[in-house]
Image (spheres, rainbow, N blue to C red):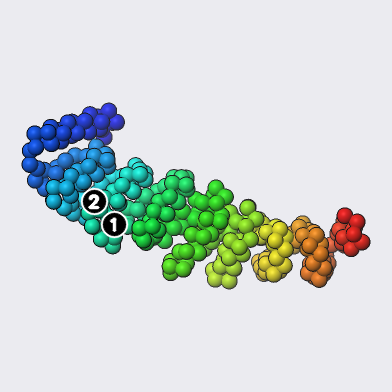
C-alpha cells in the first residue's frame, strides 16, 4: 500500500498534468476526465475528484451518478464531512435527483462512521445537513447517532432525533432504547427515561439491570413522578429483585420536600410491606416536614 508521501506525489503529478492541459486548452473527453477521476480516487483525494466533476459539468459532460458516488465514498472513507457537503452541493447544482441510487448511502455511511468513531458533534452536523436536503436517515445510522450523543450527555438532542425517527416510521430494537435509557438515567432526564423505560418494559419485555432500575427511581424522585416510581418498583418485583430501603429513600424524600403527602405515605406503606422504613431516620424525615422544622 502506498504511503502518504507516495500518494501526495501522485496527486501533485495529476494536478500538474491537469493544469497543463487546461493552460493549453486541450479538449478533454469524458474518458479523459474519468481517468483523472480514477487517479484522484487512487490517491484518496476527494477534493481533486470534486474538481474533475465540476469541470465536467461546466464542459457539458455530465458525470454519472456512479462517478459522484465514488467520490463520495472516498470522502466518507476518511470521514471528510466538509467534502461530503461540497460534493452533495455539486450534485444539487448538477441536478442529480436526491433519490438517485446511492445518493443517500454515503451520507448515511459518513453519519454512521462519525458516530462510531466518537465524533457526535460532526455526526450531528451531517444529520442536520441530511435533514435540510430531505435525505432519509437509515435506522443503523440513526441508532449510532443516538448512542453517540447520549454518551456525551446530549440527551435532549438524542431524544429529539429518536422522536423524529419514530414519526418517520423508523423502528428500533431494544438496544437503542437501552442506550438512551442509561444516558437519560445518568443525566436525570425525565421524558427520555420514561419513554425508553416504557418501550423496554411494555414493548420488548426486557429485563433491566438493578442499576437501571435504581437510576429510574432517582429520575422519578428528582421529578416527583410517583407513577414512574410505581412502575419501576412493580418491574423490580416482577424480576425478583429484593427491594431495599435505599431503593425508596430518594423518592420518599422528594415527595416529602414537595409536600405530596398521599403519595409519600403510599411509598412508606410499600416500604413497610417490604420490611423497610421502620427506622428512626425515615420517621424523622416525615415528622420534620410535617411540623415545618426543616
Q: Quadrant of residue 64?
A: bottom left
Residue 218 vertical placement versus 120 (above, below): below
Residue 233 seen from this side: no
Q: Residues within 10 Å of mark 2 (few under 14, many from 20)?
A: many
Residue 147: x and y in percent read 50, 53
Above or below 117: residue 246: below
Residue 6's place in the image compared with 244, above or below, is: above
Quadrant into which the N terminus falls: top left
> Can you give x and y, in whole percent of width and height, for residue 242 in the image?
73, 62
Q: Are marks 2 and 1 in contact (CB under 8 Å)?
A: yes
Image coords of residue 26 (percent x, y): 7, 38
Q: Residue 20, located in which quarter of the rendered image?
A: top left
- Label ID, residue 264: none
* Label 2 SS: helix
Please name whichever residue, 176 or 19, is drawn nearer the observer in this view of the structure.
Answer: 19
User: Would you identify the image quadrant in which residue 278 lies?
Assistant: bottom right
Helix, strand or loop for disc 1: helix
Identity of the residue drawn at 17% across and 31% down = 16
> Relative to residue 187, is residue 158 drawn left or right?
left
Q: Work out how far the residue at label 2 is from the one at label 1, CA to CA, in angstroms.
A: 8 Å
Please state if 77 lies on the left or on the right of 278 as rendered.
left
User: How many numbered circles are shown?
Assistant: 2
Residue at image coords 89%, 63%: 290
Task: Give coordinates of residue 243: x percent, y percent.
Answer: 74, 62
Q: Quadrant of the C terminus?
A: bottom right
Front-lying residue, 147 or 86: 86
**Badge 1: few (under 14), some or many (20 or more) residues near its Cα, within 10 Å?**
many
**Residue drawn at the location 76% of the way across and 57% of the way down:** 250
In this view of the protein, which residue sits in the foreground, 197 or 258? 258
Q: Which residue is mark 2?
A: 68
Residue 11 visible in the picture:
yes
Q: Which residue is mark 1?
A: 103
Amino acid at each position: 500500500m502506498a504511503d502518504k508521501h507516495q500518494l501526495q506525489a501522485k496527486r501533485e503529478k495529476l494536478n500538474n498534468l491537469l493544469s497543463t492541459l487546461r493552460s493549453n486548452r486541450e479538449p478533454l473527453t469524458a474518458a479523459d476526465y474519468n481517468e483523472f477521476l480514477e487517479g484522484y480516487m487512487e490517491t484518496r483525494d476527494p477534493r481533486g475528484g470534486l474538481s474533475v466533476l465540476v469541470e465536467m459539468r461546466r464542459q457539458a459532460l455530465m458525470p454519472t451518478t456512479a462517478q459522484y458516488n465514488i467520490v463520495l465514498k472516498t470522502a466518507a472513507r476518511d470521514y471528510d464531512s466538509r467534502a461530503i457537503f461540497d460534493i452533495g452541493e455539486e450534485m444539487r447544482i448538477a441536478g442529480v435527483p436526491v433519490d438517485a441510487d446511492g445518493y443517500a448511502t454515503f451520507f448515511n455511511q459518513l453519519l454512521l462512521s462519525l458516530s462510531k468513531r466518537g465524533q457526535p458533534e460532526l455526526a450531528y452536523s451531517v444529520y442536520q445537513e441530511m435533514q435540510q436536503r430531505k435525505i432519509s436517515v437509515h435506522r443503523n445510522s440513526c441508532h449510532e447517532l443516538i448512542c453517540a450523543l447520549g454518551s456525551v450527555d446530549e440527551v435532549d438532542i438524542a431524544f429529539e432525533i429518536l422522536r423524529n425517527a419514530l414519526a418517520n416510521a423508523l423502528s428500533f430494537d431494544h438496544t437503542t432504547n437501552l442506550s438512551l435509557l442509561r444516558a437519560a438515567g445518568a443525566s436525570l432526564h425525565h421524558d427520555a427515561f420514561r419513554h425508553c423505560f416504557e418501550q423496554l418494559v411494555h414493548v420488548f419485555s426486557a429485563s433491566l439491570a438493578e442499576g437501571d432500575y435504581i437510576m429510574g427511581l432517582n429520575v422519578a424522585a428528582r421529578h416527583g413522578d410517583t407513577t414512574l416510581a410505581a412502575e419501576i418498583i412493580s418491574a423490580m418485583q416482577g424480576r425478583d429483585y429484593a427491594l431495599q430501603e435505599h431503593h425508596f429513600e430518594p423518592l420518599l424524600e422528594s415527595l416529602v420536600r414537595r409536600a405530596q403527602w398521599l403519595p409519600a405515605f403510599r411509598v412508606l406503606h410499600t416500604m413497610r410491606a417490604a420490611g423497610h422504613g421502620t427506622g428512626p431516620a425515615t420517621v424523622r424525615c416525615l415528622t420534620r416536614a410535617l411540623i415545618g422544622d426543616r
